[in-house]
Amino acid sequence: MQSASSSAPTALPPPAPAFPPASGAAVGAGADSNATHPDTVDPDVVIDVVGASVVRGGKFLIRDISWRVELDERWVVLGPNGAGKTTLLNIASARLHPTSGIVHILGERLGRVDVTELRTRIGLSTVSLHDRIPTHETVLDVVVTASYAVVGRFRERYESADERRARALLAQLGAGSLLDRAYGTLSEGERKRVQIARALMTDPELLLLDEPAAGLDLGGREDLVRRLAGLADDPDAPAMVVVTHHVEEIPAGFTHAMLLRDGGVVAQGLLRQTITSENLSEAFGLPLQVTYADGRFGARAAS
Ligand SMILES: Nc1ncnc2c1ncn2[C@@H]1O[C@H](COP(=O)(O)OP(=O)(O)O)[C@@H](O)[C@H]1O
Ligand SMILES: [Mg+2]
């Protein structure tokens, strides 16, 4: 390998002039978004995917997906392993541009927007992100540092406000007693809660959680699902999308669902109308019986 770290000295195209603005106004995206897509400036639509496909090595990871998520909606994306859930979430988090199709996230069209700026408006929690958190970092720092990407050089001035917010979020997620613990010493359930607090730290307009309950024991799962239900119930909480492959992990208060299989949509829409025995059986490729009680779903093989 040659010295890749010295990075390409070649001519970068000149960035947009005078960016970022010198004032502390942070990332005021959206102001210039009225330019070329007057069809999608509905401020209530946070995710607008039209006919999106992702192809890698001749294989469709997702195929012709259309999906609209509005501000006050809480979605669950369900499907077996390999169905394309994470791929779809990568698009929704502006990490991945589809091979074809048109995507607007928070009113900004992917491919025409500075995604680093857009990403600061999205809270994302995935296993791969958390594998990168240093184990010696304190819980408070794990959460507070999420804001540095946004406030950057204004860090000093905002420090105490950031800390207050981090403490409040950790308390809300039942991790208020863990502030000084090293991240590496936490249980899996504690880590998940800290990760969600971190994802919320920047006050995102969209919160995306990829399999938040994966690896938790029953108590940990139930605790997390209950806290997600609490978030879902909070009118100030951002629009939410939670990916899972277990209907038992759908928190009460969630409103919509998308079922995926082999990269395609089996069904989507209002939660109760979408999570049915018929649709779930088709998504998972085996006869399943869905139950529903007290706001929670269950599923087992049909007898
Ligand atoms: N970069 C890639 N190149 C080729 N195949 C990929 C790539 N990323 C994911 N896949 C495949 O695409 C399919 C969908 O993956 P993914 O979106 O991660 O599914 P899920 O999250 O539902 O388990 C899987 O079969 C996976 O192996
Ligand atoms: Mg996945």
Image: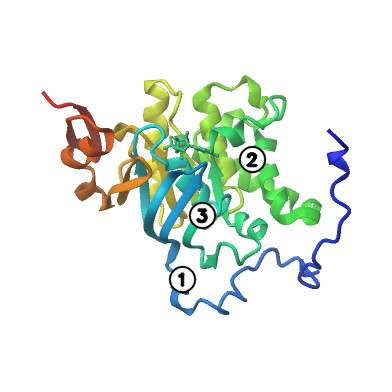
- Look at mark 1 in the image and give the residue it sits on: 43
Q: Nearer the viewer, residue 50 or 30?
A: 50
Amino acid tagged 3 = Thr
Residue at left offset 38%, top offset 38% = 83
Residue 148 image point, x, y percent: 72, 49
Instruction: Quadrant for residue 259, please give it.
Output: top left
Horizontal side of 181 relative to 240 (left or right) equals: right
- Look at mark 2 in the image and give the residue it sits on: 143
**Which label sits in the foreground, 2 or 3?**
3
Residue at left offset 77%, top offset 54% = 152
Q: In which quarter of the image is the C terminus?
A: top left
Between the C-alphas of marks 2 and 3, the distance is: 34 Å
Q: Badge 2: how crowded within 10 Å, few (<14), some, or many (20+)?
A: many
Residue contact between numbered discs 1 and 3, judged by CB atoms under 8 Å: no
Secondary structure beneath label 2: helix
Residue 99 has which mark? 3
Residue at left offset 42%, top offset 38% = 227
**Which label sits in the foreground, 1 or 3?**
3
Residue 244 image point, x, y percent: 39, 36
